[in-house]
Each structure stands twice: as C-alpha cells, then as structure tokens.
Amino acid sequence: MSNLVVVLNVVILCGVVVSAVLAVHFEKLLSSVIALSVTGLFAAAEFLLLHAPDVAISEAAVGAALTPLIFIVTLKRLKGGDDK
C-alpha cells in the first residue's frame, strides 16, 4: 500500500509541474488559465493524499474553480478573450 501512495504522489507532482509549465508556455491566455486550473486540481489531489481534506477542499474551490472563473470573466470583458 505504501508503494502505491508513493507512485500516486510522484504522478500528481509530475502533473503539477507539467501543467504549470504548460500554463507558462501557452500563448493564448484562455489556454493558460485552463492549465492553471488543472494545476489547482492536481494540488488539491495532493492535499487529499497528504490527509488534509480541508485544505484540499479550499484549494479545489479557490485554485481550481474561483480564480480561473474570475480570470475567464475578465478575459471575456477585455478584448474578447482570445487575444495575446
């Protein structure tokens, strides 16, 4: 069971790194916001594995839902959202 947890931790942390690099790499702002949201989801999953469900719920609500929603609404109000 311990090896499975270690493997899940490594997979989730690799997901965090890859999605964060993609958020910086994408040229379209909407794609970057979506990648940032995925980073928040991976972070919430890691907090669940670390037995911190309260922090995981907060991260999922704020990092994966509320912040990207605010960014998307702002992008849509400014120049249509798909501009560089």
Image (tube, grey):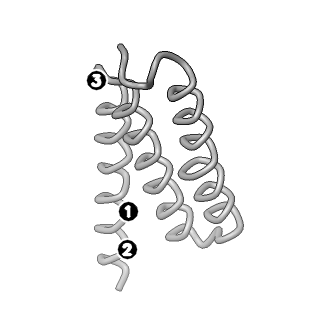
> Label 3 belongs to which residue?
25
Q: Is residue 62 left or right of residue 45?
A: right
Q: Are marks 1 and 2 in contact (CB under 8 Å)?
A: yes
**Label 2 amino acid?**
Val
Residue drawn at x 58%, y 47% as measured from the top left: 63
Residue 16 is situated, as x and y percent measured from the top left of the image, at 38, 46
Q: Relative to 29, does residue 34 appear above or below in the rendering?
A: below
**Label 3 amino acid?**
His
> Label 2 belongs to which residue?
5
Residue 60 is situated, as x and y percent measured from the top left of the image, at 58, 58
Q: Which corner quadrant of the image does residue 70 belong to?
A: top right
CA neighbours of label 2 inside 10 A, class few (<14), some (14 to 19), many (20+): few
Q: Is residue 49 left or right of residue 58?
A: left
Q: Nearer the viewer, mark 1 or mark 3?
A: 3
Q: CA distance from mark 1 to mark 2?
A: 6 Å
Residue 19 is situated, as x and y percent measured from the top left of the image, at 33, 41
> Which label's residue is closer to the chain start, 3 or 2?
2
CA neighbours of label 1 inside 10 A, class few (<14), some (14 to 19), many (20+): some
Residue drawn at x 50%, y 49% as measured from the top left: 40
